[in-house]
Image (cartoon, rainbow, N blue to C red):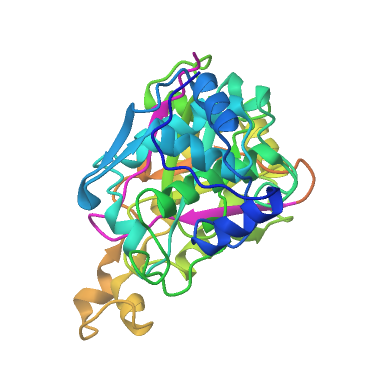
Amino acid sequence: MIELKSRRLTADDEGSAIELCYANGWTDGLPVIPPTASRIAAMLEAGGLEPGKQLSFIENRQVSVTAEKVAINAVMAGCKPEYMPVITATVEALADPLYGYHGPATSTGGSAVFMLVNGPIAKKLNINNGDNLFGPGWRANATLGRAIRLIMRNVIGTLPGELDRSSLGHAGKYTYCIAENEEDSPWPAFHTTRGFKPEQNAVTIFAAYAPHQYSNGLGATPEGVLATTCAQMRMSAGTNRQPQYALVFAGEHQLIMKNAGWSREEVQNYVFENTQMKQADLQRANIKPGPITPETESTMQPLVHTPQDLLVIAAGGKAGVQSCYIPGWGGKNGSQSVTREIRVP
């Protein structure tokens, strides 16, 4: 039997145990599964982990995140034991300096941890990549993202109104996990852009604001669809020059890209060029400071630094003419997306 180090509390029954978690501030506002020793052990065994193994160290908080604490919160979130390798990889990614945990976790901006799962494990765990992509109905999507938020809350101390100073927040702070539709995608799987092989499993995390959905039923070409994409992105751009954006294309828009033979790079280049705005227009909108001058009238402000900062993803329902873009957190030196391999014992 795995030896656990965490302190133990007792309750008369499951209902009392749930209320005990509420009383101690360990929930996200929704009921949790009581983390019994047997449930925690099953989670650790599925991950091939010893309880004391450090999975990450959050530098700004000086917090060591151990496998036992991760397993406890995964149980509380309602995860199945087989989800543990995905959670482990995500926790490892949180500590990457490129992601920069402290900024997006504490900012008034209110970003959440967006998770994209690639590889055979996505289908094995039934992670939704289609209809109602960011909505309810799939246990894996709901509980994987929830586990990460509970770990942030209960292990790292990212509590609303304390370390988490978000002014508004958004629903992705409950859970923000999807898989890519690799089967129907016009492009190679996203994780292959990060050096992984298609048959490998990987999770990409991204400090992200809420999805901005748009519709385009008139454009029958990539340029026609992307004209709407870029117009929508320009309208919300420039608040702090987000370092990256995710572009999520659903089924009908995927098919237009596929039929035209457009590569991911062509999409990135088109959007990069067509989302630039005059600095003067940003000044008129009170997004950029300073007086409007002939120079600012002629200076173009790119949305991101490079086309590669646009993360192009295929996911969403096959019917309908909706897609979305997701702004990333931060300014010039903001958080970067990070990809980690999911290692299954």
Tell me where residue 180 sits by quadrant. Answer: top right
Q: Main secondary structure of the magenta part?
A: loop
The tally of labels here is: 0
Question: Can you give x and y, in whole percent of width and height, for residue 6 in the image?
Answer: 41, 39
Q: Which residue does the image show at 33% across and 77% down from the upper left?
A: 287
Q: Which residue does the image show at 48% across and 45% down from the upper left?
A: 148
Question: Can you give x and y, in whole percent of width and height, for residue 88 in the image?
Answer: 44, 30
Q: Is residue 139 visible?
A: yes
Judging depth in this view, the residue of 110 and 312 nearest the camera is 110
Tell me where residue 324 sits by quadrant. Answer: bottom right
Judging depth in this view, the residue of 119 and 164 nearest the camera is 164
- The answer to whether 291 appears left or right of 272 in the picture is left
Bounds of the magenta segment? 321-345
Q: Is residue 242 visible?
A: no
- The answer to whether 226 appears left or right of 301 in the picture is right
Question: Can you give x and y, in whole percent of width and height, for residue 305 in the image?
Answer: 28, 50
Residue 9, above or below 91: below
Tell me where residue 216 sits by quadrant. Answer: bottom right
Residue 329: say if magenta. Answer: yes
Residue 161: say if magenta. Answer: no
Q: Which residue does the image show at 56% across and 22% down from the upper left?
A: 119
- The answer to whether 77 appears left or right of 268 in the picture is right
Judging depth in this view, the residue of 141 and 291 nearest the camera is 141
Judging depth in this view, the residue of 220 and 124 nearest the camera is 124
Question: Can you give x and y, in whole percent of width and height, for residue 223 in the image?
Answer: 57, 48
